[in-house]
Amino acid sequence: MHIKAEPLPTPLPCTGARLRRLTRRTTAFYESYLRELDLRLTQYSILMHLGSAPQALTELADRLEMDRTTLTRGLRPLLRQGWVEERRGADARMRLYQLTDGGLAMRERAQARWAEAQLALEAVLGRSFADALNQRLEEALSRLKPALPEDN
Amino acid sequence: MHIKAEPLPTPLPCTGARLRRLTRRTTAFYESYLRELDLRLTQYSILMHLGSAPQALTELADRLEMDRTTLTRGLRPLLRQGWVEERRGADARMRLYQLTDGGLAMRERAQARWAEAQLALEAVLGRSFADALNQRLEEALSRLKPALPEDN
DNA sequence: GGCCTTTATGTGCATATGCACCTTATAGCA
DNA sequence: TGCTATAAGGTGCATATGCACATAAAGGCC
């Protein structure tokens, strides 16, 4: 009896795995443009959601739809660079964040680079395909709401 | 003169940010099913790409389309649990990985939970929408090839 | 005002991610 | 047979991610 050639396993299509794969590649694509500014895509997103009006951590996290604790740490490099400043308001529990002048300038430069990346991405994907993809993503986001804590 | 109410910034739609957001939520969705097995979605993906036939690290990384160094560390918990074993082949540089018997059993249990998650996800998104989304993701992956090292 | 609950945030832990750089084998070739 | 280029992997560093747990301040009530 001969030895079976073991085929490499090809798992069933997993939407989650595909999403992670595509996200890895897409992130790399954007970051190849942001690299000269030494900025990650996530950091860019945070910068773009900040303004001169102070926002509490949780409020900002909600708007970014990211975990509060992830944001806490994600803000650190931006604070270190002096692009964001932290204040305390009347409620001593809250930390309020806002862009500094330098942060505002940085945001503009970053947005310019981002726009190039976005255009280039749409060119690679094809405009109409990119539009359709964006719509699907948006729709998926609205259909897949995060599970509420369900206080039992 | 009165004080302007500073509106919170609403950045231009960024495909990358959207993808990251959706990936975060989707991963959380799958992992709520895999949690009882103490398995992350990434680890599940790795398990599903392993078999009884030994594969070199780089080969496995290519098939998973993930970074080689990420995989090195991603394999660690699986090795620790005894689901995967590492061997050395004729070429002393290579590390070959394959499932153990326990790993095979784990893979089956994990796949059952994953299947529930996948079905539930498709139910939440709607079958036809989920199918369409999957196709878009696949298509996007094939259009957005990673930049080759460009040996200058 | 003191007590209890809720709210806002931080920290520890364990991965996930990928770039830059380092080490070790193997392969090619003079 | 050496010498050199290349291939396979690992490590250090800096973030990204999110759960479980801890702390402190605010709010409500009696």
Image: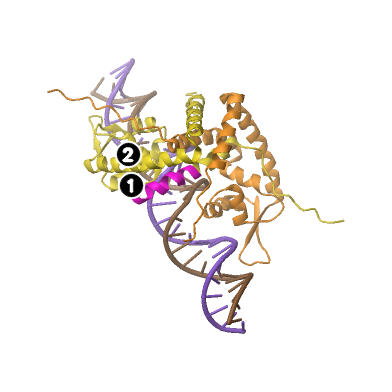
Chain colours: A orange, B yellow, C purple, D brown
Residue A149 position within the rendered picture, expressed as x and y whole percent measured from the top left: 50, 56
Residue B99: % across, % down? 26, 38
Would you say A151 lies left or right of B99 here?
Answer: right
Residue B123 on image: x %, y %: 46, 39
Q: Which of B139 and D16 is in front in this view?
A: B139
Whether residue A6 is visible to the viewer of this picture, yes or no, is: yes
Q: Nearer the viewer, residue B120 or B40?
A: B120
Task: Check the image and report above or below for A95 versus A128.
Answer: below
Residue that mark 2 sits on: B47
Magenta segment: B25-36
* Majority secondary structure of magenta residues: helix
Discs 2/1, front? 2
Chain of the residue where label 2 is placed in the rendered structure: B
Q: Where is residue A118 in the image (x, y as percent from the top left)?
A: 62, 32
Judged from this view, the residue extending furthest toward the right is: B1
Pointer 1: what residue?
B77
Earlier residue among tags 2 and 1: 2
Residue A80 visible in rendering: no
- Helix, strand or loop at label 2? It is helix
Query: Please, which chain is the residue tagged with disc 1 on?
Result: B
Q: Nearer the viewer, residue A102 or A17?
A: A17
Q: Is residue A147 left or right of A4 when viewed as pictured?
A: right
Name which residue type carries label 2: Leu
| Magenta stretch: includes residue B42 | no
The residue drawn where x is 33% and y is 41% is B112
Which residue type carries mark 1? Pro
Q: Is residue A60 above or below residue A6?
A: below
Outermost residue on the left side: it is: A1
